[in-house]
């Protein structure tokens, strides 16, 4: 993968840590952001090395959302023809797919949010599994303030994380949702006083996840995402098929033995994925 301009990426002790590192631009989402995030997530999905992904940021704000130059030049949205409007659909589908990769990634994703989480950043963190925040963090569906509809996942995922009436209030008014209210509504898991404590808390959770059997974590994420969007009966059937596919007596014995012996368990990584189109087959 080419060197990253918008992020830094480090993997240690089975924890991948992706950092938004354009604080001078408030970590806005320019065209390079989308290309790099897509490439990073594709790499992490294929590799079996990382067992959890932590996404954090730098500077005053987690991210101020979409950069103004994202839709400049050749990417300008054309609303003057049917063909141009059809292209808007396809362009948005690609951007939506990038954030959906966070949701479908084979490993859990933890967002550590400091300061403002604005516009497209809300789309991003709602696709993550867990969200931790600093006390000064806030969330804003900024799109309505600039005359448009939020279109990359916020309006689809946020109502599954918070009361619908609250989401409507935020989406209609563009008001800021502070960390305390976000915690009360269940959008964030925990609030920390400082960015340093925030990152430490996110990494501690990641460490605990990484110590579990990766295939069991994979199955748990699969089951919960499916249950969110299906009936209880359908989700229970899916659970039976899923458990039958990944059950491991060896993993259970090792987990129980490790608990009794008060040591860390030893579990295999997820298998690395090799795609046919990368092999030229």
Image (cartoon, rainbow, N blue to C red):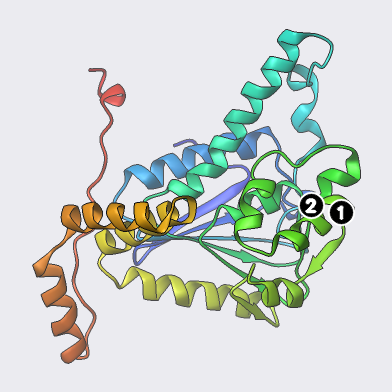
Q: Which mark is residue 119?
A: none
Task: Quadrant for residue 215, please give it.
Answer: bottom left
- Decide: is 179 above or below 88: below
Q: Which numbered disc flags the more N-terminal residue, 2 or 1? A: 2
Residue drawn where x is 56% and y is 43% of the image = 99
What x and y, as percent, mark residue 233? 36, 56
Query: Dots 2 and 1: beta carbons under 8 Å?
Result: yes
**Is residue 61 in view?**
no
- Decide: is 27 above or below 73: below
Horizontal arrangement in the rendering, residue 164 relative to residue 44 (left or right): right
Q: Which residue is mark 1?
A: 174
**Is residue 260 in view?**
yes
Circle 2: is it few (<14), some (14-19), or many (20+) Cα within 10 Å?
Answer: many
Task: Name the quadrant of the C terminus.
Answer: top left
Task: Name the quadrant of the N terminus.
Answer: top left
What x and y, as percent, mark residue 77? 78, 21
- Decide: is 184 above or below 278: below
What x and y, as percent, mark residue 137? 75, 69
Residue drawn where x is 68% and y is 17% of the image = 87
Q: Which residue is mark 2?
A: 141
Q: Nearer the viewer, residue 246 or 271?
A: 246
Q: CA distance from mark 2 to mark 1?
A: 5 Å
- Tell me the element at label 1: loop
Horizontal arrangement in the rendering, residue 47 relative to residue 162 (left or right): left
- Decide: is 165 above or below 143: below
Residue drawn where x is 87% and y is 59% of the image = 175
């Amino acid at each position: 993968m080419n060197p990253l301009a918008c992020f830094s990426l480090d993997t240690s002790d089975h924890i991948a840590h992706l950092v938004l590192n354009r604080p001078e631009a408030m970590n806005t989402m320019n065209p390079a952001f989308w290309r790099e995030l897509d490439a990073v997530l594709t790499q992490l999905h294929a590799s079996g090395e990382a067992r959890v992904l932590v996404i954090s940021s730098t500077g005053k704000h987690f991210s101020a959302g979409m950069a103004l130059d994202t839709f400049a030049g050749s990417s300008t949205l054309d609303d003057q023809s049917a063909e141009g409007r059809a292209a808007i659909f396809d362009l948005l589908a690609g951007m939506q797919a990038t954030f959906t990769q966070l949701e479908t990634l084979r490993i859990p994703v933890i967002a550590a949010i400091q300061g403002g989480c604005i516009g497209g950043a809300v789309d991003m963190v709602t696709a993550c599994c867990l969200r931790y925040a600093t006390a000064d963090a806030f969330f804003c569906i900024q799109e309505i303030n600039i005359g448009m509809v939020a279109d990359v996942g916020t309006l689809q995922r946020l109502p599954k994380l918070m009361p619908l009436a609250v989401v409507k209030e935020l989406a209609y008014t563009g008001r800021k949702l502070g960390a305390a209210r976000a915690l009360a509504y269940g959008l964030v898991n925990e609030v920390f006083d400082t960015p340093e404590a925030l990152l430490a808390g996110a990494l501690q959770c990641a460490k605990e996840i990484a110590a579990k059997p990766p295939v069991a974590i994979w199955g748990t994420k699969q089951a919960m995402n499916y249950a969110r969007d299906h009936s209880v009966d359908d989700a229970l059937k899916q659970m039976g098929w899923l458990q039958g596919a990944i059950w491991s007596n060896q993993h259970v014995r090792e987990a129980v033995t490790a608990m009794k012996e008060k040591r860390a368990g030893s579990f295999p990584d997820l298998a690395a994925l090799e795609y046919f189109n990368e092999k030229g087959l």
